Image: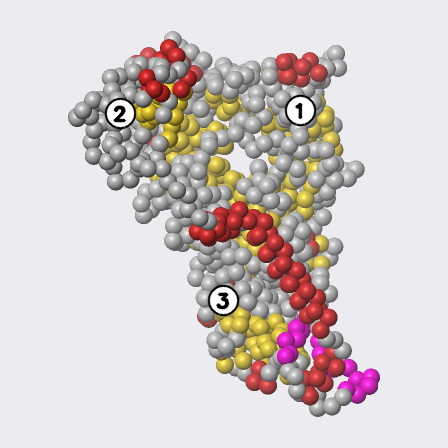
Amino acid sequence: MELPRPRGHEQQELGQGPGAPRLRAAENHRCSPHAAAAQEREHTSAPGALSQPDPRGSTAPLACVAAGLVPRSGPVALPRGHRIAEPGGLVLLGAAAAPRGHACHGVLRGRACCACHGVPCMPRDAALCGGRGQRCRFPSADSAERAVQRFEVPGVSNYTTLLLSPDGGTLYLGARELLLAVNTSRFQPGPLVRRLPWSADGEKKRQCAFKGKDPQRDCHNYIKMLLQLNSTHLYTCGTCAFSPACAYVNVQRFSLEREASGKPLLEDGKGRCPFDPEYKSTAVMVDGELYAGTVSNFQGNEPTIYRSQESRISLKTENSLNWLQDPVFVGSAYLRESLPPGNPEGDDDKVYFFFSETGKEFDYFENTIVSRIARVCKGDLGGERVLQRRWTTFLKAQLLCSHPDDGFPFNVLQDIFVLTPGEPRWRETLFYGVFTSQWSKGGLGSSAVCAFPMRSVQKAFAGLYKEVNRETQQWYTDTSPVPEPRPGMCITSHTRHLKINSSLQMPDRVLNFIKDHFLMDSAVRSQPLLLQSHVRYQQIGVHRAQGLHGTYDVLFLGTDDGRLHKAVRVNHKVHIIEEIRLFRAGQPVLQLLLDQAQGLVYAASYDAVAQVPFANCSLYRSCGECVLARDPFCAWSRGPPRPPAVLTPLARRLWAQDVEEADTERLCRLANASQPPTGAPCQPVWLPPNAVRPLPCQLLSNLATRRWAHNGAPINASYLVLPDGALILVGSPERAGTYDCWSLEEGFRQLMASYCVRVQEPASGPPQPGRRPPAARDALETVSTSRSTSAAGGAAARLHGKTYWTEFLVMCALFAAAVVVLALFLLHRHGAGMKALLEPAEAARRPKQPRKPAESLPLNGSSLPSAAPEHKGYQALHDNYVASTPVHEPPGPPRAFSESEKRPLHVRDSFVEVSPACPRPRVRLGSEIQDSVV
């Protein structure tokens, strides 16, 4: 049974503004990495460079290699651990630094260039960057040009957690009622995959079903947490049929730790793991202590940020104070802000939580979702009298990612990635977030990527507080004096100077203040680095890459339909490089995990886990392609390659790389890559008279434009170019010649295809026996449109030996039958209407019936109407409801009554008449009509 997507806030998405990077579709590309980095070979046609057979059977010229790394004919033999330092940061390592299964022969700033079985390969931590939209697109997950390693086990679903071992050799997977340990170098199902079943017992499943949950969907054990406890054990928690539990996993045996009785050693997971498998939660392990953001009850309406460990007091948020308002947790991080040791501030380490919740400070008609960043201090012990066993350092602030033009907010946080250069450099931390909006603007399914620096976060937490009125639940900015020491701060050198060495010693006025002032007034603001319309990002991972001329952040973005986008941040913008299909449509990317050391991306969905290498420099077949890719790890060699030990800063000028501007005119001038290859052969094309043939032309980049030329001159409007770029030719003498297809991108011009077209002369006589026309040797498809009735046309028809007279007769017969069927259908459908049209003519031919004489005088004594009214609406009256009125006598002599009038009438002979011409109802008594009141 497949678990639905994690429950979050219902939302609609924002459309995209005019300045957003556009997604361009393509069907086939050569710009793509191979399956794994260990198989990435450098190919080059430059003098002295490597030449390796292409996987598709041809020898591909390449000279684009890892930035600062030069391909060699084999690994360098150095003593184990030996290092040779060169100016510019180049370091040559011995085999001691090589990853498992690889022999390193050179590194640049810690990036290894290794050899696989003696054959040089590309570094596994490469990353791609690109232009304004994604430069390459691989719509199929099974594309040979950008292969994806997928791990799928029949019967296993819901891969909700990923954990990489410290050495990077094992990937731990948490699924439904199963834990898996997969070897990263053999990423496929097999006997080497270790399995650890962990299912909920029968009694818990029965209780789950009794409480109204779906036994096939909810009453299972979904692994929601998998963390590294220490070098020997993992800590894992699961829902266990809406009765969460946690356990310890022995890494060496890959089994659950058990009690003396043989039962698994389980702990109560309440406050650590959610009850509902659809609920999103987060957790981080800090020195053996678990910090978790989740819900703590069966109904899911008691959110909490909880710290649990036997060695210290367990702390959590206060639910009665509404510190959290229906949050959806997306991530957490631990930052060692106490470093470097001995700093004058003496601050404490902090744990940050990221989530979206209902913003009660906004008094709008509908609930407004707000993205938050919250923090607690590692040394928090709670209060002595106030806030006992509760956080005394809990503070939260708004994360605001808004459009720079109109301020439209992307207010729903989908995922967060905390990028820290190193523990001592925590002040340079960047918080990369993926946001969507609960409102729509121009279209659905839009996303934004924002980055928040640590200095902005610190400024918000050091600003003014918001205060809530408990009676009216209204929020306002508190400008009153702040108690001393500052509420919500950790134990620092300042508090120690005040003789406060623990939160238990905090004054009550400070703790009472924090109970109602846990929300900061200022928001942490940022503008989107990337806006995407009709693309919904759900996961993000960031890798900091070192190029020839600087350091760049490479982003990996997972979408809700199983795609992966690669991008690079350059000059306060993000350039999308490529789009890779990881999973089939409808399978979202639930988790992203980066292996920084091995250069691999792991993505999890409901039914599979995918492994993708960061990059492949062997994609780029020319200097222009390599430079336009804006790849921080790839550069084009403009001269003979040199060993790494002799690559000096002067020799670096022979390498072409420009991530910021992609100036191909300046960098590729020596390589002469923008000119067509000398003596490049044309593909011969033979066209029969009046035959139609497409000439395909596929570009390597989605950002390039296509230009066709005929005999060196651009084609005019008389030519037809299909949407896929193919040129349509019709066989005629003026269409003969050479056709070239050029790719133009930011000034770089490259020949993509060349065709030498010749039009066959019409045959003047019968064909020679045994002779085949040249068109039979052409692999391109030809469509004949000849309508000639001349002798030459007849000869061409005899050559083909095919007429269409039979098909013409069949089509005529089918058309006639269709017309007959349509006519019969119309007659049947509209027969009644046609009959009604014919009836007036028949009525005109019938003799007119004599009409009865009109009454000489109306009953009310007024003048006669212009036309005799048509009496309608007669109703029979019951005996008990007949009331007659006096008869109005006209002026003049008294009227004599006949015998029939003197005879009393039966009530059954009376009727009531209602007529528009008469203002009062009239009663028909027999043959007389009289005014009456009924």
Region rendered in magenta: 767-787
The correct choice, above or below, for 762 with respect to 810 in the image is below
Asked if residue 60 shows in the view, the reply is yes
* Residue 328: percent from left, percent from top: 48, 28
Q: Residues within 10 Å of mark 2 (few under 14, many from 20)?
A: some
Per the model, the C-alpha gap separating discs 3 and 1 is 53 Å
Residue on which disc 1 sits: 216
Which residue is more in the foreground, 555 or 140?
140
The correct choice, above or below, for 129 with respect to 726 in the image is above
Per the model, the C-alpha gap separating discs 3 and 2 is 86 Å
* Residue 569: percent from left, percent from top: 45, 51
Q: Residues within 10 Å of mark 3 (few under 14, many from 20)?
A: some
Per the model, the C-alpha gap separating discs 2 and 1 is 75 Å
Residue on which disc 3 sits: 705
Residue on which disc 2 sits: 920
Q: Is residue 242 left or right of residue 668?
A: right
Q: Is residue 768 magenta?
A: yes
Q: Secondary structure at mark 3?
A: strand
Of all residues, the one furthest to the left in this rendering is: 891
Going from N to C along the chain, the mark reached first, 2 or 1, is 1
Going from N to C along the chain, the mark reached first, 3 or 2, is 3
Which residue is more in the foreground, 781 or 879?
879
Going from N to C along the chain, the mark reached first, 3 or 1, is 1
Q: Residues within 10 Å of mark 1 (few under 14, many from 20)?
A: few
